[in-house]
Amino acid sequence: MLREILRGTGVALITPFKEDKSIDFDALQAVINFVIDGGVNYLVTLGTTGETPTLSKEEKLDIIQATFSATAARVPVVIGVGGNSTHDVIKEIDAFPVDKATAILSASPYYNRPSQEGIFQHYKAIASATRKPIILYNVPARTGSNISAATTVRLANEIDTVAGIKEASGNMAQCMQILRDKPQEFMVVSGDDALALPQIACGMDGVISVAANCFPKDFSRMVTAALDGDYAGARTINNDLMPGYDLLFAENNPAGVKAFLTELGIIKNQLRLPLVPLSSELHQQAKKYLSTLK
């Protein structure tokens, strides 16, 4: 089952850039090595943390291929393929080497704000175009619409290849309703680093994390402890990480995580407009916080 293969910590990889804003593939290799050595269980490429709205289709393909090459089959890889045009999402799936991926992560359509029936039909059409497992991605703060618990459970029950959801609504009641009503084999992972611990306690299978880019060892240890039922140990680690979560998302994502990775000497602090680096004051706070981690 997918929920067994992808149990634990997934990392939503950043896209490192050079000073001329081209993709820094050497830095991407370094990030991948850093997170795998830190204990993450799988990688997610081309999520929103990877600044995908600023990437061309050719760049996306290059990043996928570079990710598979750098990973060298050490951990599973999930490919992010989403958008507000169902037709275009299907075309991207056809164009990408999804056969090498463990699953496809697909955010619900953004901006045009479809009805729940529209969301259902969107994913049904995507599922008809591939036999790869599909992980729904519910992130209303970015998309402008919510995948309701009822729609998630309907998709899980009616479409075999809809195998899981990354839930980033922040709505704990909705999350618990999904966990209560879903089929047993359906995977539910957190999309909120700061809520991952309580959501795992409610029954989630892990998290697809931003923090795991820069705190892979500590964050993975926290998730593993929680999944093993060691909530006291998980709380201790999570308490230390909480100031880091605040800094990661204080301005925009991935400005925070790129600031941390810059201070770790892994990447250059470059983003593509309209995103800009973390403000100087917050960057200094991030640098100070890093010095407190053991």
Image (cartoon, helix red, strand yellow):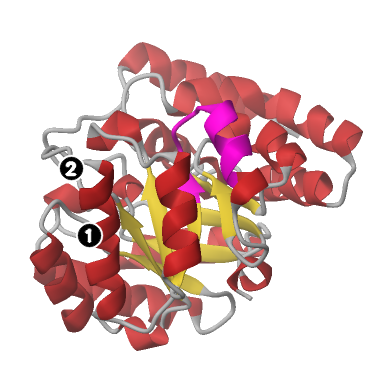
The residue type indicated by label 2 comes to: Pro
Residue indicated by mark 2: 114
Residue 170 magenta-highlighted: yes
Q: Quadrant of the N terminus?
A: bottom right
Asked if residue 265 shows in the view, the reply is no
Q: Is residue 88 above or below residue 10?
A: below
**Residue bounds of the magenta highlight:** 166-178
> What residue lies at 36% left-to-right and 51% top-to-bottom?
14
In the image, 203 versus 81, the foreground residue is 203
Q: Residues within 10 Å of mark 1 (few under 14, many from 20)?
A: some
Give the vertical position of 105 relative to 288 (above or below). below
Task: Give x and y (percent) for residue 205.
Answer: 67, 54
Left-right relation of 89 to 81: left
Q: Is residue 82 above or below residue 281?
A: below
From the viewer's perspective, tell me whether residue 142 is left or right of residue 291: left
Amino acid at the residue labelled 1 = His
Q: Which residue lies at the image location 73% right of the left edge and 38% below the top edge?
A: 202
Give percent across and percent down for residue 133.
44, 74
